[in-house]
Amino acid sequence: MILLEQTEKLQQYLITLKDKFEYSEPPENKKDREFFLQVKQETEPVYELLNQWEKSALEAVKNREVQIHPHQVTSTRENMELMLMHSYYIDARRKRYMELNNSIHYVLDQIHRELSQA
C-alpha cells in the first residue's frame, strides 16, 4: 500500500507545516536569497512526495480503490503546495490558511480511512 504510506507522510507534514505557520515569525526580507534556498531545500522532498502521491491517488481513483473524485486529488496537491509556501512566508490570513489545512485533511483522512479498511 504505497498510497497509504504516502498519505500518512503527507498528514505528518501537514501537522509540521501548521506548527511552523503558527509559531514562526515571518521572514524579515521575503526576497532574501538565503531564505529562499533554505525553503527550497526543506520543501523539495515534500513536493516530490506530493507528485508521487498525486499519481498514486489518481491511479487508485481510476481503479476504484478509493471513492473520491480526481478533481479532489488535484485540488489537494495544489492546496498543499500553497500551504507549503504560506507556512514559510507566513503571508496568508489565519482563516484562509486553516481553510486550506482543513480541506487537505479532509481528503487525506478520507483516503487513509478507505485504504485502512481495505
Image (tube, rainbow, N blue to C red):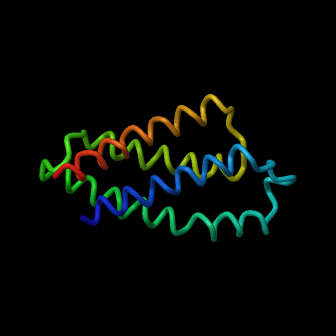
Place of residue 55 in the rendered image (x, y in percent of width and height, measured from the top left): 29, 59
In the displayed structure, does residue 103 sit left or right of residue 3? Answer: right
Which residue is outermost to the front? 117
Residues 22 and 46: in front is: 22
Which residue is outermost to the left? 63
Residue at 40% of width from left, 57% of height from top?
Answer: 8
In the displayed structure, does residue 76 sit left or right of residue 20? Answer: left
Residue at 67% of width from left, 63% of height from top?
Answer: 39
Q: Quadrant of residue 109?
A: top left
Which residue is outermost to the top? 95
Which residue is outermost to the right? 28
In the rendered image, the quadrant that contains the N terminus is bottom left
Residue at 37% of width from left, 46% of height from top?
Answer: 108
Image height check: is 92 above or below 30? above
Label tally: 0
Place of residue 13 in the rendered image (x, y in percent of width and height, measured from the top left): 52, 56
In the displayed structure, does residue 34 sit left or right of residue 99? Answer: right
In the displayed structure, does residue 92 sit left or right of residue 116? Answer: right
Place of residue 16 in the rendered image (x, y in percent of width and height, measured from the top left): 59, 54
Place of residue 59 in the rendered image (x, y in percent of width and height, measured from the top left): 20, 56
